[in-house]
Image: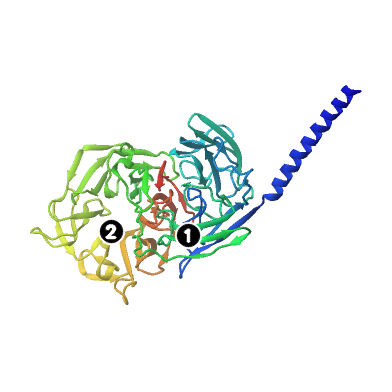
Amino acid sequence: MFVHSVKTMKRLSYHILCAVLFLSAALAEQRSQTFSVNGNVKTVERPVSYASVTFIDKSDSTKRYSTVTDTSGNYRLDVTTRVTSQVVLTPQGIELEQNYPNPFSSSTAISYKLNRHSDVNIRIYNILGQEIKAWIVGSQTAGTHGLLWDGRDNFGKKVSLGIYFYQLQAGNETHVKKMVFGFGGMNANASILQSGPSQTLEKASTTRILAGTFAVQIENFNCTTTPQVATKQFDNIAVQSDTTLNFVVAPAAAQPPSPVYPAPYSSVVWHPDGRIAFNWTKILKINRCTGGVNEKDIDWDSSGFWMINSDGAGLHRLLSYSLGNAAWSPDGEWIVFDNLDAQIYKMRFTGTTFDTTTLAQLTTGGENSFPTWSPDGLWIAYDRSVADFSGPSGGWIMRSDGTGKRFVFKGYMLDWAPDGVHLAYVGLWSEIYRVNITDTTQVVRLTSFNQVDPYARDNRCPRYSPDGTKIAFSSQASGEIPQLWIMNADGTNLQQLTTPGAESFSWSPDSAQIAYVQHDARKADVNNGTLWIMNADGSNKRQLTFNYNLVFEP
């Protein structure tokens, strides 16, 4: 009887203990709740995109919780009320959190916690186990960290819809989770960096903080913060419930100059046999803030003068160095180009390689550039931009062996018409003209962009189509980026072909297509400055080359 009673009491005590633990957990749960802090950061005139918003706990200034505004200046943080017995401020181990959002259609945040100083790498794999994206993050301190992924691989191309695995390697520990790309979902933090390359952030786009009183610090996240702002701290901000907190800050006293990003591809020239040649400087890293490139961040062993088929196949390197403003002879057996010493050279092409023993310098003195062949291959027209004892600056011609040089007229960036009689060129007020080479008094102006404002547009590089019916050229409005335009050979039917920026270009031998470098010097984009092709009416644009392994930092 006594033994039975003891057993009964033990069972009763066990059930009471379980009930107490359950009730304690329930009470703790009731004492804890999650709500959100959101708002907007702006100057008097405009929202501030990519600004850093940091909440600093007034009771312990070492506790900081950060996020970044989106392109509209909006931010959001999730707030958890303070529960002393339940809150753990220091990560107990290395943790990889589920990406958010998941599934996602454009960008997603991957956050992780470190309980110690660690070397960190993040990799993404497809379902076949193939690596498609990697971040070599490097050394990081203990705390919460994260990054955004925009669904692009190491080559800057969007990945296919499907299931992917993301792996955190921190020191000797490895953690893996699954995510789904392309099936509904939303974007990380409204649109933080959703259109740009993935970036490492000190916090994930959604950060949980403890309710209380905070100082809020607004500052530049990095050079992408637009406009740049003066750091501002707002004190004694109370956060106890769902709260909207908007902040007005002052722009920085001096805004940094806008970066100008280089084009890795240049000097596009279509060979008569249908292949396309071009310069490729294989840049691996570009400074996002300045657009600058260090010598060590160029793969010189892969740079040079390259060739590709018009369908994007057959990419191969012809020379280990670049050729400036190159032009093929009508039969495709020779190439002329200018070089860093501002002189013009020519070299024989066998169809597969260049015979470097035939390299010959055609000009001396002055500064010479933009060579172009006559239709019969007997003459070369070119620019001389600096006058000296041998003659004035302007448009010159010479025989293909460099003899018989003579000044023709005051014009630049010449191109020979297929009739062999006319030259298109850039003349007064940067307009495009046509001149009869046998009688240079016969001049016709083909464009009229700058008749009211002489500096409204910078027109460059007129190029006749091989059939002589069209002229394509580059045109840059003041304060804008260059675009490709086309007109009839008599100057009529003028139309713009591109909307993303476009620079160096060349006609196909059949006059049906144009190859060009798509380039917007204002944008940090891994597809910027690459080789594209389109129909002569501007339709059917398609990309031929890519900036493999190019990254922008920070």
* Rendered image: mark on residue 296: none
Residue 178 coordinates in the image, percent (x, y)? 61, 38
Task: Identify the residue at the far right of this view.
Answer: 1
Residue 496 coordinates in the image, percent (x, y)? 42, 64
Q: Is residue 123 above or below residue 466?
A: above
Residue 190 visible at all: no
* Rendered image: mark on residue 49: 1
Closer to the camera: disc 1 or disc 2?
A: 1
- Secondary structure of the residue carrying tag 2 is strand
**What residue appears at the point 20 percent right and 39 percent down from the top-left corner?**
358
Which amino acid type is marked by label 1?
Answer: Ser
Q: Is residue 181 above or below residue 233?
A: above
Residue 181 coordinates in the image, percent (x, y)? 59, 44
Between 60 and 452, which is closer to the camera in this rendering? 60
- Secondary structure of the residue carrying tag 1 is loop
Q: In terms of image quadrants, where is residue 16?
A: top right
Which amino acid type is marked by label 2?
Answer: Asp
* Rendered image: mark on residue 415: 2
**What residue appears at the point 40 percent right and 62 percent down from the top-left corner?**
230
Between 524 and 60, which is closer to the camera in this rendering? 60
